[in-house]
Image: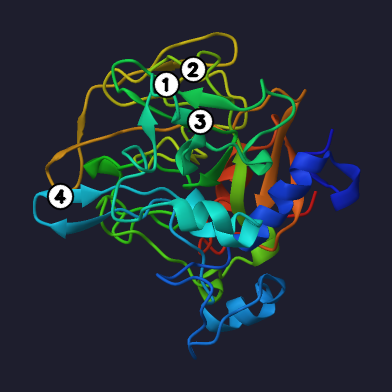
Amino acid sequence: MQPLQQRNLYSVQPPLMHFRSGSALLRERLGQHPLVDGRGSEMRPSSMGSEYMSARKSFPAAANPFNPSPTVVIRHGWPPQIWPYMEERALFEQFNYSKPYYLPPNALSIRHPNRFGTPSATHVPAYSCPSDRGHGFYANPGFGYFYIRGNYVLSWGPYAYQPEAANYPPRASAIFGFKDFFSHLKSRFTKTKDIIDGLSKTLVMSEYIMHPNDASIDGHGDIFNDVGDAVFMTLNTPNSTVPDEEANNYCDPAPPDIICHSPAPVSNVNGMSGRAVHNAARSKHKGGVNAAMADGSVRFVSDTIALNVWQAMSTMNGYETVSEQ
């Protein structure tokens, strides 16, 4: 099996058609009023490709938290940013952006009778890979709130969620990350001109196996999260036997699909306790994972791909040469 296999859009299953479309839509950063362009004109959904790219020319953030005051952080992940361009305008209108993704009205408690009707708990088919268990939920009793799990996550590059001081600064950047690689409130919004290595050779998304137990505290499949669970890292090759690393006590192994451990906090470059979180791309497909590139194409990447090639694909400005083979 070749490490990289180009797939025609119509040769894959329907959910992956959404996956391909979603990867292309990630090039379109949503502003505060995502259906209004820079001239104040309403944009029709059919114009989202050329007109929106012309107006914005950047990807959304993998995580987009903000702090309205020194003691308050409003946490948001990447899915709500692209809902209007996935034909999910109703979810976008229902979502309250002044509240975190896991609090009412965006999500309700795990025992609330209306918990399935919130925007954070609404299953969108493009979230899920048909090879996994179907749509799952994050319903940990300790956390208390109920929202969706999914399979598709964004590329963070060959680094932990917050790199240790010894590995700072990284040599190159992934499309998604922090401007300084460690500050949670400094999300990177990458423009297409920043992708020096080429759109067709730079990773945007790949797969991730959901934890099989909705009640588990484990973050695998927690695609709305903004602190490392909604991204994958290329520190290891796809479906690696090296365990993923989860922060604090968020690891709940469920072999053979969920292999992980929880590392102690590390000292990152700013001297504060950080999260050395990293998750490999993983799937239940035999021999590899599906991955989306920045040009919107989808490829099947073999588990046997050379680590240096996999890592080169995950950075946008490393000046590496990556062969199609």
Q: Amino acid at mark 3?
A: Phe
Residue 139 image label: 1
Residue 116 image label: 3
Could you tell me how far apart the alpha carbons at marks 1 and 4 are, in whole angstroms?
A: 24 Å
Which SS class for mark 4? strand
Residue 37 image label: none
Quarter of the image with the N terminus is: top right
| Between discs 1 and 4, the one toward the N terminus | 4
Tell me, yes or no, if residue 174 can be seen here. Answer: no
- Residue 149 or residue 187, whichever sits in front: 149
- Residue 261 or residue 27, whichever sits in front: 27
**CB under 8 Å between discs 1 and 4:** no
**CB under 8 Å between discs 2 and 4:** no
| Between discs 2 and 4, the one toward the N terminus | 4
How many residues crowd mark 2 within 10 Å: few (<14), some (14–19), many (20+)?
Answer: some
Tell me, yes or no, if residue 145 can be seen here. Answer: yes
Which SS class for mark 3? helix
Q: Which residue is mark 2?
A: 214
Q: Which residue is mark 4?
A: 72
| Between discs 1 and 2, the one toward the N terminus | 1
Which SS class for mark 2? loop
The residue positioned 31% from the left and 38% from the top of the image is 103
The residue positioned 36% from the left and 41% from the top of the image is 161
Q: Outermost residue toward the right?
A: 11
The residue positioned 55% from the left and 64% from the top of the image is 319
